[in-house]
Image (cartoon, rainbow, N blue to C red):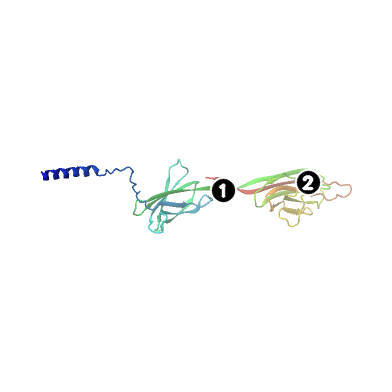
Amino acid sequence: MGNTRLLAAGGALAATMAVAAPVVTLDRAVAVPAPARGPASGMEFSAPHGEVEAGTPIVLSGRAGYLDRTTGNGGRVDIFFRKGQATPKVYLGSATAGSSGRFRFPTRANATGEYVAHYQHRKLAVTADATDFLAVYTSRAVDRRLFSWTATNLSCLPTCKAVGPDQQISAGPVKVRLERKCLQPKSGGRIGFTTDQKNAYRAGDLGWRDFPQGDGPTEFELKPATTKGHFYLEWTSATPPQGQFSSCDITFAVSQTSMDKTYV
């Protein structure tokens, strides 16, 4: 009897302990750490800045691979050219990227467009791409008429004057052709390009040419210090002897050679 009661009591205790056992539940998600990221790869790539004339030798250069490393970036860089985003690429050749990732590719600029570089690491599955734009032009010398003036049978007493409009010219010399024919010898004057509204002549100014008594070349150059102003001519006939007339035929034309630029 005693044993039976003891077993029963023990069973009740076991049951009580089983009921009292805590229940564990997961009411919050456990954060999973993100996988570690490898070093970032990329490319620095550039063509010459600005613009160049067609046929100019250029060097395309850059650096590719793991840009935060100075070694271990050896690989191959293929170079392409295309006129625009919608046009196909033309393969130009390849360059070798050294361990630092630096590379150079010499070529000639023949057209305006984009240079495209594609890098492939020598051993790893690492690639990078970059582009750069270059404008290319052709040029030719063009002779442009800037101003001309013609008059006949002018007395030029006291003085004949011709004033051109204000205009912009290119830097550099201008070519002048001046023809004058006066009945009276020693008739002279001057011609120039100036910003001065009073058209004051200064000896030694390369923008002027002086003909004190009319003698001098028919064709010559002026070298103005300014590119904005107007052309001016004045001519004075020598006083004729009593009973004679003064008369001048004068014509002059000014032109300038400049380079005409066309992008290709």
**Mark 2 element type:** strand
Q: Nearer the viewer, residue 89 or 210?
A: 89
Question: What residue lies at 12% left-to-right and 43% top-to-bottom?
Answer: 4
Q: Amino acid at mark 1?
A: Ser
Number of numbered discs overlaid on the protein picture: 2
- Tell whether label 1 touches label 2 (CB within 8 Å): no
Where residue 222 appears, as percent x and y from the top left, is 70, 52
Q: Residues within 10 Å of mark 2 (few under 14, many from 20)?
A: few
Q: Nearer the viewer, residue 250 or 71?
A: 71
Q: Is residue 131 visible?
A: yes
Where residue 235 appears, as percent x and y from the top left, is 79, 49
* Image mark for residue 120: none
**Mark 1 element type:** strand
Q: Residues within 10 Å of mark 1 (few under 14, many from 20)?
A: few
Query: Outermost residue, front direction?
Result: 2
Q: Amino acid at mark 2?
A: Lys
* Image mark for residue 139: 1
Looking at marks 2 and 1 on the same chain, the residue that comes earlier in the sequence is marked by: 1
Where residue 25 appears, as percent x and y from the top left, is 29, 43
> Quick check: 204 left or right of 243?
left
Where residue 157 appears, as percent x and y from the top left, is 83, 47
Query: Outermost residue, left direction?
Result: 1
Q: Nearer the viewer, residue 21 or 99?
A: 21
Q: Nearer the viewer, residue 124 or 222?
A: 124
Which residue is under mark 2? Answer: 161
Q: Between marks 2 and 1, how big is the CA–CA gap?
A: 37 Å
172 versus 84 height, above or below: below
Question: What residue lies at 67% left-to-right and 45% top-to-bottom?
Answer: 145
Query: Outermost residue, right direction?
Result: 242
